[in-house]
Image (cartoon, rainbow, N blue to C red):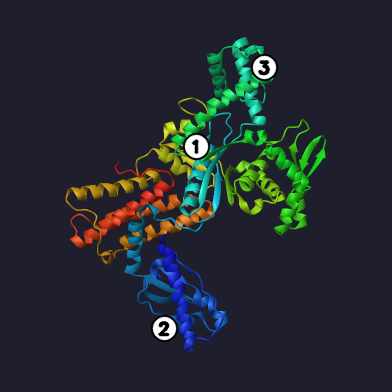
Amino acid sequence: MTNMIQNAKEQAAALAMAAYRAAAADGTLPEAEVKTAPVEIPKDTANGDYTTTFALAAAKALGKPPRVIAQALLDHMDLTGTYFTSAEIAGPGFLNFRLGNEWYAGVMNAVETEGDAYGTNESLKGQKIMVEFVSANPTGPMHMGNARGGVLGDTLASVLTACGADVTREFYVNDAGHQIDKFARSIEVRYLQLINGEDSIAFPEDGYQGEDIKELAKAYYDENGDKLLNVSEQERQTVLAQYGLSVNLPRMKADLERYKIHYDNWFYESSLHESGYVAETVALLTERGWTYEKDGALWLKTADILREHFRKAGKKEADIEKLDLKDDVLRRANGFYTYFAADIAYHRNKFAVRGFDKVINIWGADHHGHVARLKGALDALGLNGSERLDIVLMQLVKLLRDGEVVRMSKRTGKAISLHDLLDEVSVDAARWYFNSKPDTQMEFDLGLAVREDSENPIYYVEYAHARICSLVRALAADGITVPETADLSLLSGEAEKALIKQMAQFCEEIKLAARDYDPSHINRCLQELAGCFHRFYTACRIRGEEPQVAAARLKLADDARAVLKNGLKLIGVDAPEKM
């Protein structure tokens, strides 16, 4: 797809190199091995829209001052038929280019011809990528961290898809292991208390204390009575755990669907154990010499794996020793495999069985210590986890209401869950705010999220789209429709040019969001685009303007609407036509 910013950069670089070759051919500049210098958009575009440091970079090789080189380039540069109307020297030897009508028209033409595909690219074409996110324990309601991780993972997946990747969204269901045992025991005790009285059995200190556990026990009792009273403890816990999962998992799926998150796959941890894949994975590590037995348990030589990893990365031995690296248990003395063993097997499955080129996990920052260990274990299996597994660590969420910290739901009096949140604010607002920079702690102000003014960024952006739709409808009622063609050279004002430049920037921000694993690039781009449109609409009259000018401006407004719509769709937010 067309990226007019990239096109302009490449053309400016080619112009500088062609000018150098022409200057070298006639002896103005000496022949030398000169590389193309990067072209950038300067922070202050008063002196030019694009700039290159070609002359500064070539000064040493050519043995001449940068400004002399820059002047020689200008003297040998032909801008005929290019995106640029002029070039000039600035500062110590920067070469600045000014954009002409052809470039601005090119942006608008790309928006119109590419439609819903505008902004996409093929930079990741051919790559098979998994994004695993949320993966909340199915033992209780999803919380704020899950809410944030859900949007970050879902939007990142959309961004990677927009860059041409074959993307799979996956939820890893932890339906085995210690937390499920604790879940089963917690429901069991509440169930027995319902039958025999609350004092008949003590609730385990490490049990799940939430009201949701009591509700599950009561729901099972209401349906089945005391039929589990006289069966074995193991059978009772197995039945109650499965019942709890049968209630919780559909709730989680329903909440996520409401949140506009649709997974391609729900992968169950239990399947790894039942198929023997965890045991097989641990056996492979043993074959490769990475395990040992101690105190009846099987251990992974995590410390040795990580030392080797850090050595390859160039870390000094003294610094490695300071890390206090420790080994990990893979199989306990009782014969049960640890969560870490299952996690290694799960990620081995992603690479070795399902063939993903890259796997991206969205984790809470409290999992930081697990990152190197998991990557190292995959390295030990020969799967190159250091390069193929990427972890996005997201910081905590602080929930506010009009500036005051909120921990409890007004409706339930309990900790706010994703379900509670979506009862208070719109799905669009939640998705917008949680799609923030992952590595920063975020503050979500419930009061701001429901405000209908320019202080609320999601309202500000959605209003820009609705405002354009309203304009188009109003003009259509007067018999004026968006023209198929217009004289775009009439769009010469600063507000008009700024709006077109921001529309072009959308393509760049999608690439940056994919590169940085930071989909908040899209939010910032849309906010700026909305601002550019509002400023354009204030400065540039459409209704009542001379027909040719009005036609060009109406076309520009409708193009801005299309880009806003594409961006909002990318982060899973509606583009309303009325507000």
Rendered view: 239 above or below 61: above
Query: Are circles 3 and 1 on residues that touch, CB within 8 Å?
Result: no
The three-letter code of the residue at mark 1 reads Leu
Give residue 218's position: percent from left, percent from top.
55, 17
Q: Is residue 326 visible?
A: no
Q: Which residue is mark 1?
A: 399
- Disc nearer the start of the sequence (2/3): 2
- How far apart are the two marked residues, 2 and 3, measured between alpha carbons? 90 Å
Q: Which residue is mark 3?
A: 202
- Disc nearer the start of the sequence (2/1): 2
Secondary structure beneath label 1: strand
The three-letter code of the residue at mark 3 reads Ala
Which mark, by number, is residue 75? 2
Q: Quadrant of the N terminus?
A: bottom left
Query: Are circles 2 and 3 on residues that touch, CB within 8 Å?
Result: no
- How far apart are the two marked residues, 2 and 1, measured between alpha carbons? 60 Å
Give residue 25's position: percent from left, percent from top.
48, 87
Q: Is residue 399 visible?
A: yes
Residue 456 horizontal side relative to residue 516, left or right: left
- Disc nearer the start of the sequence (3/1): 3
Which mark, by number, is residue 505? none
Query: Are circles 2 and 1 on residues that touch, CB within 8 Å?
Result: no
The three-letter code of the residue at mark 2 reads Asp
Residue extending farthest to the top is: 196
Give residue 447's position: percent from left, percent from top.
42, 37
Residue extending farthest to the bottom is: 27
Residue 381 horizontal side relative to residue 171, left or right: right
Q: Residue at x 37, y 52 (%)?
A: 116
Secondary structure beneath label 3: loop
Q: Nearer the viewer, residue 64 or 255?
A: 255
